[in-house]
Image (spheres, grey):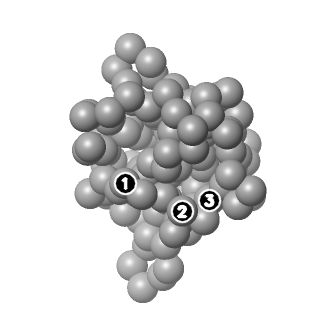
């Protein structure tokens, strides 16, 4: 079981990035995938998540209207489209997976401790 993130880069404020989380060694159908981020000196926080069972999604308040999580079934991957990026979005972005046996989103969809598998992260830097 492996998750690999890609797409992180240096971008100017107001720009866009598309992150990808590719899964190998397992099929994502019965999992939820979450995106989390950790900025230097700050705690990890949840960004967005999606249920691959029913495609329901949940976004952190700061992500609403700017970030969109979606499924790339052909690639067994989940993407995070980030628009109108701000310097405060600078962080290492991680994807994580939790097996939900078809239950959809969890009661606390972005509680990191619920997630079983984690990628190594991809860095996003937004310059002002």
Residue 110, disc: 3
Secondary structure of the residue carrying numbered label 1 = strand
Mark pair 1, 3: CA separation: 14 Å
**Farthest-out residue, top:** 74
| Residue located at (38% from left, 28% from top) | 27
Place of residue 57 in the rendered image (x, y in percent of width and height, measured from the top left): 68, 39
The Cα–Cα distance between marks 2 and 3, rounded to whole angstroms, is 8 Å
Q: Is residue 82 above or below residue 39?
A: above
Tell whether 29 sits left or right of 103.
Answer: left
Q: Which residue is mark 2?
A: 114
Q: CA distance from mark 1 to mark 2?
A: 10 Å
Q: Which residue is depicted at the point 38% across and 36% down?
A: 20
Question: Which mark lies nearer to you, 1 or 3?
Answer: 1
Where is residue 3 drawn, in percent x and y? Answer: 30, 44
**At 48% from the left edge and 81% from the top edge, which residue is drawn?**
42
Viewer-closest of 25 and 92:
25
Residue 40 appears in which quarter of the rendering? bottom left
Task: Give the quadrant of residue 110.
Answer: bottom right
Q: Residue at x 74, y 56 (%)?
A: 107
Q: Residues within 10 Å of mark 2 (few under 14, many from 20)?
A: some
Pointers 2 and 3 in contact (CB under 8 A)?
no
Residue 98 % position (x, y): 49, 50
- Tag 1 and tag 2, C-beta contact below 8 Å: no
List the residue tagged with mark 1: 117
Q: Secondary structure at mark 2?
A: helix
Residue 119, above or below 2 = below
Residue 45, numbered circle: none
Image coordinates of residue 96 in percent, x first then y, are 43, 52
């Amino acid at each position: 079981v492996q998750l690999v993130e890609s797409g992180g880069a240096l971008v100017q404020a107001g720009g866009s990035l598309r992150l990808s989380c590719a899964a190998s060694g397992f099929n994502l159908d019965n999992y939820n995938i979450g995106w989390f981020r950790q900025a230097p000196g700050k705690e990890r926080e949840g960004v967005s998540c999606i249920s691959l069972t029913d495609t329901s999604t949940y976004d952190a308040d700061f992500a609403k209207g700017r970030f969109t999580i979606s499924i790339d079934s052909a690639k067994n991957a989940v993407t995070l489209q980030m628009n109108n990026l701000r310097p405060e979005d600078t962080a290492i972005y991680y994807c994580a997976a939790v097996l939900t046996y078809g239950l959809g989103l969890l009661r606390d969809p972005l509680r990191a401790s619920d997630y079983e598998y984690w990628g190594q992260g991809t860095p996003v830097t937004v310059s002002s």
